Image (cartoon, rainbow, N blue to C red):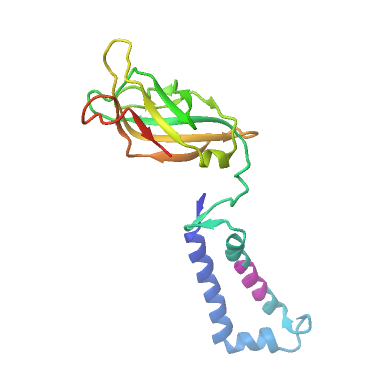
């Protein structure tokens, strides 16, 4: 999704400037719309006037097409329903852990998508270590983008460790990345910044599962 507010303001400003020129410039109106002795378009407009009208039309189309195509929601440019049926190929997660002393973990961490568990394994970086970042290994996910948007997604932590320590995990930033079938690149789906601690222990390690969606 791309922010379209800037484009709207720029195009709107250009349109206003062009319309103002047409309204307030008598010589421009005379030369472009009523002048004689020059080439005419459709027998009405001079070449210069036709060029201005064409520019105005192009700006209007650029502004209004996304609206009529259902592609602007909350000021954001989206793909409407075109992505809803696109099949996903893989997902992975980008993690930034907290800086507290016990922020790392060696327990089992899973993401449940509609109650189907996917164990998170390290792909790059140190996503299970304190004050570090990394990405999980890719996980195959054969559902559509629309199904993902409507799925229940939970981040779960079993709080069982190999050595009895490190059962808590403090998460600073957690992002879900998706890859569509036939594509090579990943796209950010969502980012969560307020997860905090995952653990079965008492406060401040408050929860063993966090509902992402």
| x 56%, y 76%: residue | 18
Segment colored magenta: 52-60
| 3 with respect to 65 (left or right) | left
Closer to the camera, 152 or 166?
A: 152
Residue 60: x and y in percent read 60, 69
In the displayed orientation, state which residue is furthest to the top. 163
Residue 68: x and y in percent read 61, 63
Closer to the camera, 32 or 126?
A: 126
Closer to the camera, 62 or 147?
A: 147
Most prominent secondary structure in the magenta stretch? helix
| x 52%, y 75%: residue | 16
| 38 with respect to 84 (left or right) | right
| 9 with respect to 210 (left or right) | right
In which quadrant is the C terminus drawn? top left
State the image quarter where residue 66 is shown.
bottom right
| x 54%, y 66%: residue | 11
Residue 96: x and y in percent read 35, 31
The answer to whether residue 188 is above or below residue 10 is above
Q: Does residue 57 show up magenta in the picture?
A: yes
Residue 202: x and y in percent read 21, 27
| 209 with respect to 117 (left or right) | left
Q: State how many labels appear.
A: 0
In the displayed orientation, state which residue is furthest to the front. 115
| x 48%, y 24%: residue | 118
Q: Does residue 81 show up magenta in the picture?
A: no
């Amino acid at each position: 999704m791309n922010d379209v507010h800037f484009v709207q303001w720029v195009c709107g400003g250009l349109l206003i400037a062009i319309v103002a020129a047409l309204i307030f410039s008598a010589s421009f109106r005379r030369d472009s719309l009523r002048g004689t002795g020059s080439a005419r378009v459709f027998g009405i407009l001079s070449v210069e006037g036709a060029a201005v009208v064409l520019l105005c039309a192009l700006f209007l189309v650029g502004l209004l097409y996304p609206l009529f195509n259902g592609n602007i929601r909350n000021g954001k440019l989206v793909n409407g329903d075109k992505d809803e049926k696109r099949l996903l190929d893989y997902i992975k997660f980008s993690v930034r852990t907290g800086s507290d002393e016990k922020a790392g973990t060696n327990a089992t961490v899973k993401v449940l998508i509609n109650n189907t568990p996917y164990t998170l394994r390290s792909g790059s970086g140190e996503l299970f270590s304190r004050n570090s970042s990394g990405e999980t290994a890719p996980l195959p996910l054969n559902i559509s983008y629309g199904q993902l948007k409507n799925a229940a997604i939970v981040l779960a932590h079993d709080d069982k460790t190999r050595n009895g320590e490190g059962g808590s995990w403090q998460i600073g930033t957690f992002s879900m990345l998706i890859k569509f079938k036939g594509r090579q690149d990943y796209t950010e789906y969502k980012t969560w910044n307020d997860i905090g601690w995952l653990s079965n222990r008492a406060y401040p390690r408050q929860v063993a599962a966090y509902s992402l969606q």
